[in-house]
Structures are given as C-alpha cells and as structure tokens.
Image: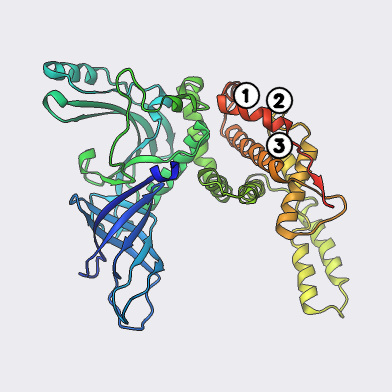
Amino acid sequence: MKHKKSIRKFTGTWWLPSSGRQVAGELRLIRNRPFLHIHDELHERSVGSDWPSNANVIHGVLSSRRKVTIYDAFYFQMGTSLVPGGPRSCRVSGKLVIFDAHLAAPLEQRFSAMRIHLRGFEKWTNFQAILDDGFGKDAEALESRIVCRQTRPWVLANLDDITIQVVSSLEFRGAGQRRTILHRGLISIEPTTPRDLDWCLKMLVMLERLFSLLYGNSILADDVRLIPVMRTDDESAFHILNSPRLVARRKGKSSNPRFGADIVLPLGCLSESLARKMAECWLQHAQIATDSLNLYFAQLADPGSHLESRFLPLVQAFEVYWRECFPSEIEDTATFQSIRDTVVAAIPGTCSATLSRSMRDRLHYANEPSLKDKLLRLFGTLEEATVALLVKDRDQFAKAVKDTRNYLTHYSPSDNMRVLRRMDMHWATVKLKYLFQFILLKQIGMPEELLRQQITSHWRFSQEQRQVMSANERGDRLT
C-alpha cells in the first residue's frame, strides 16, 4: 500500500521534438522516477527494422494542458503487434520530468537559481507551516499578519560561489470564504554563475541525501523549481518532480503526527551554525565518496525483498567508502612491487596462460587489507561508546560480515568460516546501516556525544537496539 501511494499518473499526448508523430499514453511517476506507457512507437521506422535504444528527449502535453519534457529517456520494453508493421505499445523510462516547459536540448539550458521543498522540512526547522481556510472578511488582515511574520532567510551553506539558504514561501489559493494561505520553508540554491541541468540535479541529489541522514529515512524532494537565466520569479520557473497536491499542516492539526517524531536530528538540536558547517562539509565529502554513497542510499531508498539483497550492497558500500576516503596499503608501494615481481617470476613456465593470468590478477589486490580490517578501521573512526550502541564484539562482528560476504559472493566455505543467517543477517544489516550513517555524520562534523544523545532517545532506534544487541553477531559454522 505504501508503494501504491508513491505512484502518480498523468494522461497526455507525447512526441519527439524532431518528429510530428504524436502518440497517446500515460506518464507514471514512481518515487519520482518517470515511466511512460505509450500505445504506439514514437519513432517512424520501416517494417522489420530495429527499434532505437533511446529517445533522449520526449515532449508531451497532459490532459490539463500542462507542458512536459522527459529528459534522458530510453526504451526498456517493446510490446508485440497484432499485425506486421502495426502499432506496438512501448514503455519508456527517463532521468527526470520537467513540467511547464518544452526543452529541445535540456543540457543547453542554464539556470540562475533552484528552489527545493523536502517532505517534512517544516518540522525539521520547526518552521511555522500554516494552512487554514474560511477566513471570510478577515482574510486580508490575516494575510498581512503572516507576511509580516515571515522569518528571515538563513544561510544553510556558503561554498565557493554557491549560496544555499532557507527562505520563506507564502502561497495564497482560492478566493472568498475558501481562501487558503500556505506558509512553507524552501531551500534556495543560488550560484553566482548560472549552471546547467546536470549540475542542478547533482545538487538536488546531494541535498536529498544530506537530509536523509538527518531525518534517518530516505527523503525525496516533492517540489523542485528551476529558474532560468533572465527570470527572477518562481511563477516563471520550470518544475521537476512537482507534486500535484501540497500536503501541509492545518492550524492545530498535523497531516502526519508521527513524522515529526521520526526525525532523528532536527535543526533544534543542531543549531544553525552547526547545520551550516555540516552542510558545507557534506557538499565537499559527497563529491569524494560518490560510488559508496550511491550504494548506500540506493539500498536505503529501496531495500530488496531478500536478506541477501539488503546485506551485500551495504557491505560493498563500506568497502568502496574505505577505498575512496581511507585508502592504505599493507606494505609501501616499492616494497610490494619488489615482492610481486619475485612471485610473478616464480610462476612455472608450465602453467597454462589462464592460470598464470589468474595468479597475476589476484596479486593486484594482495597489498590491500582484508574486508575485516577495513571494517575495523572504519569502526575505529567512531568513539567506543558509539560503536557499543550496536556491536558487542567488533572483531567477531567484522569477521562474520567478511565470512558471510565471501560465502555469498564466492561460495568458498572453509573450516574457520562463520556465516550470518536468517534473522542474524537481518540484524547485521541493521547494524551496518546505522554504523554507515554514524560514520558519515562524524565525517561532516557531527559531535558524537550529541549524536548518541539524539539516537538513543529516538523511538525507532530504541526499539531496534534491543533486538540488535540480542542477535548473534558471530555467525554460525558451516556444517
């Protein structure tokens, strides 16, 4: 049911910018990722010819007459035709959807600012989000009071020529007795030099991931506005990932009363200065640890249905993160090269070419610590009291994680191997998820004492901690 609520559907007509061929279809946004179901092919091609692998840019008009551009689109499924050369249904995926504009070349467009709204952002900042109606004759007076009460903008990050600040947004809807006032907080990104679409998307992803760490959940933007160069108002902005309806808090009521309590690190516990420092460090750190963060946040946003599909990406995220941020060698490069040359020279000439190549390839990573040592060094970046919240014996736990990874990927059992199974694997995955979150927060300036204070008072962690600490973290011997 939760997955169904994250799907939004839009009917419309679709075509390629280079062709006048228009096809009816339905656009579905599944967790903000676009999937286009069309009833015929967009490309005109002869019977029997291959269909193209991608469409790049697709334009459309929704039934509400709203313009749409699907960027970086590609075919991923082609239906069958009842008659040779007849219409065939197609399915197209893409990188993102741009509303309110038809862009033939999105990458050539430059933007002077971007406005982002994240789900629950008002609760994180303790921002006064007001939604009320039925003001009657007092509507204008109340509107005036809210305008005067707008909070001053405060800088969330200031890096190079990029300023990121939190601004107040007022939206007035309806008229007469049904007039509505919505007061929201937006993240405004304003570079000195206009940037292209890919840069904007990278900034969007980095901010979504930062707040996913602070919230303790995977968070996506529900409204993103790109303001083109030479335009200064939000009304002329292009919208991506735009929600068809805004969910806000009515006066005295909450649209989701549990969501506020679900935020692990609200702004109130950080202070604006600490939040600014962490945001600036994150924007730099996220560009160094790109691949490991892709693995971690992909698993956080969409965990697999099987234990192994949740466990393995997290373990791989730790290993890649170590290589990106804490690379080290067992021996110095010169010493290892000398040893390697000696070993290679000792390979008998009678060995087959395949075996000889396999031995050389294995020597390539021989100077790198084992997964167990990498995990222990990463755990060592945290204080003992922080690791003790989740792990009873870090040496045994790291060995069990290493053995389990090796068993699942290589199926190479040995006498001293201990493997995590069933619920033990599940709780080991939970431990790794929290530990990776703690390490990231520590690296961007989060004080560990404050982190422990907040995490131990969080309702979800306190429930999971009892199960985590009672789980077997040593693994079971293979029999």
Q: What element carries label 2?
A: helix
Which residue bears the numbered disc 3? 379
Which residue type does callout 2 highlight? Ala
Q: Image check: 299 left or right of 195?
A: right
Q: Residue at x 41, y 67 (%)?
A: 77
Which residue type does callout 1 highlight? Arg
Q: Position of residue 186 (x, y in %)?
A: 34, 32
Q: What element carries label 3?
A: helix
Q: Which residue is drawn at 70% across and 28% down?
A: 383
Q: Earlier in the sequence, mark 3 or mark 1?
A: 3
The answer to whether mark 1 and mark 2 are in CB contact below 8 A is: yes
The dot on residue 385 is 2
Which residue type does callout 3 highlight? Phe
Q: Position of residue 131 (x, y in %)?
A: 27, 24
The CA distance from mark 1 to mark 2 is 8 Å
The CA distance from mark 2 to mark 3 is 11 Å
Let me know if residue 191 appears in the view: no
The CA distance from mark 3 to mark 1 is 15 Å
Colouring mode (rainbow / by chain / secondary structure / one colour): rainbow
The dot on residue 452 is 1
Q: Which residue is drawn at 37% across and 74% down?
A: 80
Q: Position of residue 450 (x, y in %)?
A: 59, 22
* 365 versus 472 height, above or below: below
